[in-house]
Amino acid sequence: MSRKAVLLSARMATMSEGDTPYGLCQDAAIAVDGAKIVWVGEHQDLPPEYTDWPVEDFGERLITPALIDAHTHVVFGGNRAAEFEMRLNGASYEDIARAGGGILSTVNATRSASAKTLLADALTRVDALIAEGVSTLEVKSGYGLDSVTELKMLRVARRIGETRPIRVKTSFLGAHAVPPDYAECPDDYIRDVCIPTLRVAYVEGLVDAVDGFCEGIAFNPAQIALVFDVAQELGLPVKLHAEQLSNLGGAQLAASYGALSADHIEYLDAGGVSAMAKAGTTAVLLPGAFYTLRETQVPPVDLLRQHHVPMALATDCNPGSSPLTSLLLTMNMGCTLFRLTPEEALAGTTRNAARALGIKDAGSIAPGQRADLAIWNVTHPAELAYRVGFNPLHKRLFGGIE
Ligand code: DI6
Ligand code: FE
């Protein structure tokens, strides 16, 4: 039985590409048939075939596409509050990583946690995101660095989408850090652990995209390329943590594989920006990590604008560099720290976030799109990025269902 409804509201931000800021529409109507949007426009123009459908009137509220968090590490064991204290006492993120802490401390905690505990812990974070109108979530592996734990993480990520009304896109991040056993031979780790695990995970249907961390404290471009070659062979899209702490040319490498996204990119240069523009690679900006690490190098936002590289914004929710579970606060940080406009911030968590995940049926309000919608107690969309630590969500619809 299909559920049909017409949603009414004084304001709607469709976030469709076009000349109208936010795709703003007054006295809006959205006809929803089951999980899909079938008609969008001004209420007065509603075609006769929809006029006898049940109506839900949201009054003065604002309707936007539901939000999309395009870069998270929500599945992990333990936490790293002790490192937060160490950094406040002067240690740097890289010092801690080189001393065997950092990502590797979360690897130990994740290896020893049961799938049940990992899922329960992840859901506390996912629920916080859902409460702010998130309907699609990217989740990475990368805290296992052995076959058993990487697969465990990916299965837990899939369970999130089965346990909660949210769509999960998984990214295999076996090339996240060099495990201690392979400290002297990272190439062996890539060849003997990372790539074989990717192949197994792929066969199990656990991988939607392949990611890596291209950085001095992680893997060099040649090592990432070995993993990307396998992704390409399997027909999986790639994305990359690139230019977060230094510039190793990761974004250019990713672009050469037609990457969906290059993420972080504080140290991205003009060559990297134009390579991304040519490849259609989305820039995923992660102000939570910038803020937490007290980074001072801002991503080249003006250059990205000039080259029309779409910009997404994501939480990077992880226990080390971004213990952040608010996409609304991320939008505020994108504006305050990176000088994005509130419109760019909302595009970054809707239309462009969908792009970064290769999703075509969400991220804007248009016929044919999923009815993933957020209804807010605000009158103008700029209010979503403007407030700090405030959640004005009235209701979220996931495939038309509350
Ligand atoms: N960059 C990040 O921001 C996360 N991973 C990465 O490659 C942080 C991972 C962590 O510190 O646990
Ligand atoms: Fe990350």
Image (spheres, rainbow, N blue to C red):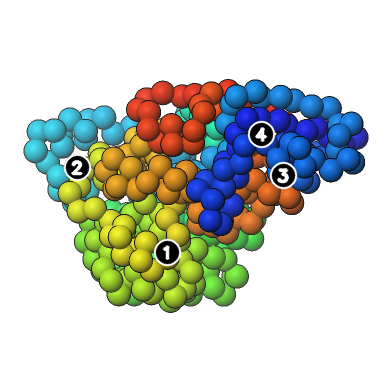
Q: Is residue 111 visible?
A: no
In the orientation shown, which residue stands out farthest toward the left?
90
Ligand 1 lies under 8 Å from the Cβ of mark 2: no
Q: Which mark is residue 40?
A: 3
**What x and y, as percent, mark residue 233?**
57, 75
Q: Please report whichever mark, 3 or 2, sits nearer to the chain's N-terminal start.
A: 3
Q: Please report whichever mark, 2 or 1, sits nearer to the chain's N-terminal start.
A: 2
Name the residue: 33% across, 42% down. 335
Q: Is residue 336 visible?
A: yes
Question: Dot 3: within a 10 Å radius of its alpha carbon, few (fewer than 14), some, or many (20 or more) residues?
Answer: many
Q: Which mark is residue 27?
A: 4
Ligand 2 lies under 8 Å from the Cβ of mark 1: no
Q: Which residue is mark 2?
A: 294
Q: Secondary structure at mark 4?
A: strand
**What x and y, as percent, mark residue 375?**
60, 29
Q: Amino acid at mark 3?
A: Val
Q: Between 322 and 29, which is closer to the camera in this rendering? A: 29
Mark 2–mark 4 distance (CA, rounded to whole Å) = 43 Å
Nearer to us of marks 3 and 4 is 4
Asked if disc 3 and disc 2 are in contact, CB closer than 8 Å, the reply is no
**What x and y, as percent, mark residue 217?**
24, 58
Q: Please report whichever mark, 1 or 4, sits nearer to the chain's N-terminal start.
A: 4
Q: Please report whichever mark, 3 or 4, sits nearer to the chain's N-terminal start.
A: 4
Q: Amino acid at mark 4?
A: Asp
Q: Which residue is mark 1?
A: 309
Q: Secondary structure at mark 1?
A: loop
Mark 1–mark 4 distance (CA, rounded to whole Å) = 32 Å
Q: Which mark is residue 332?
A: none
